[in-house]
Image: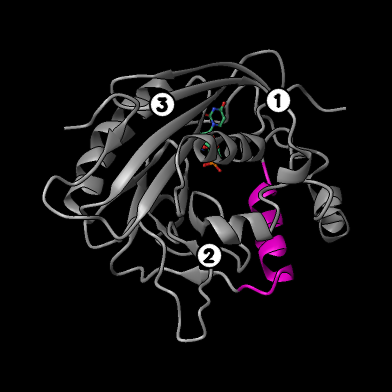
Amino acid sequence: EVTPGGKYRPPNCRSRHKVAVIIPHRDREAHLKHLLSHLHPILQRQQLEYTVYVVHQIHGSLFNRAMLMNVGFAQASLDNNYDCFIFHDVDLLLESDRCGYHCPKLSEHGRSNPKHLSVAVDKFDFFAKHVEVFGGVSIFTREQFLSVNGFSNLYWGWGAEDDDLFLRTWRKGYKVDRTDTEKCSFRMISHSHDRDNPMSAMRYLLLKQSLQRQNEDGLSSLRYRLISKTRGRVFTNVTVDVGGPT
Ligand code: UDH
């Protein structure tokens, strides 16, 4: 029932949420197939109006997960007025339908927080190892993501871009809500480190200066070359050249 571009709208009701699912990707085709066949039915059973965006980084430089998330946000926003964005690693499979893939309702003060969904992952014994954990699957409203200026664009290679996002989120006065781990647990598809995504040697230094850079580094400084944007059968495929570390 998915329409071209990986879009779905429930046939018998009006969804309360318009969700864009953003998946950063390179060379993980088997994981991608697995995730998509697992995720589409869940999102449909939750009666969400949604579109899946897979943001592919071309070869030629280190992987930049964070920047691909920013590109996904920017490109999805050109297509539709989504109110909720789910930033989703390709290798995480939700275990139960009871975990809502949508943004939280506003509190009585008219405010809500970004949410970390993948707190409980089998690989980490279903337990968050440190308080700043914000990787895997996270959820922002449009306003929240704009307010934190998205992810930093400077994290090339593996590590700490999610911790950076956690700091940015706090800095703008939000807390990070954690899901109920009874409802939301994930399996991680087992894999080793990717060749072009080595652990970043710069990550701790970048993290130290995170807050000084926040307003200048992120959505506001996002530059990339769009190679193609096509509507596939089960996802919108955005292929980009995001350059490399300077
Ligand atoms: N990703 C890609 N291609 C890459 C690198 C990363 O698609 O080459 C994407 C993908 O969506 C992935 C996400 O970025 O889920 C995060 O990267 P990751 O899965 O490498 O990060 P994670 O922390 O795993 O989940 C770290 C490697 C663990 C190796 C353990 C060896 N025993």
Q: SS of the residue at dot 1?
A: loop
Q: Amino acid at mark 3?
A: Thr
Q: Marks 2 and 3: in contact by CB < 8 Å? A: no
Up/down of 59 relative to 34, above or below: above
Q: Earlier along the polypeptide chain: callout 1 or callout 2?
A: 2
Residue found 70% across the figure and 33% down from its top:
157
Q: Earlier along the polypeptide chain: callout 1 or callout 3?
A: 1
Over which residues does the magenta segment extend? 159-174
Q: SS of the residue at dot 3?
A: strand
Q: Amino acid at mark 2?
A: Pro
Q: Amino acid at mark 1?
A: Tyr
Up/down of 180 relative to 129, above or below: below
- Rate crowding at label 3 as few (under 14), some (14 to 19) or many (20 or more) other CA atoms within 10 Å: many
Classify residue 141 as left or right of residue 245. left
Mark 1 = which residue?
224
Mark 3 against mark 2, which lies toward the viewer?
3
Mark 2 = which residue?
114
Q: SS of the residue at dot 2?
A: loop
Residue 168 within the magenta-colored segment of the rendering? yes
Q: For residue 222, what is the image quadrant?
A: top right
Colouring convention used in this rendered image of the protein = one colour
Residue found 71% across the figure and 69% down from its top:
172
Q: CA distance from mark 1 to mark 3?
A: 18 Å
Q: Position of residue 126 (x, y in %)?
A: 40, 61
Mark 1 against mark 2, which lies toward the viewer?
1
Residue found 11% across the figure and 50% down from its top:
12
Classify residue 4 as left or right of residue 175. left
Q: How many marks?
A: 3
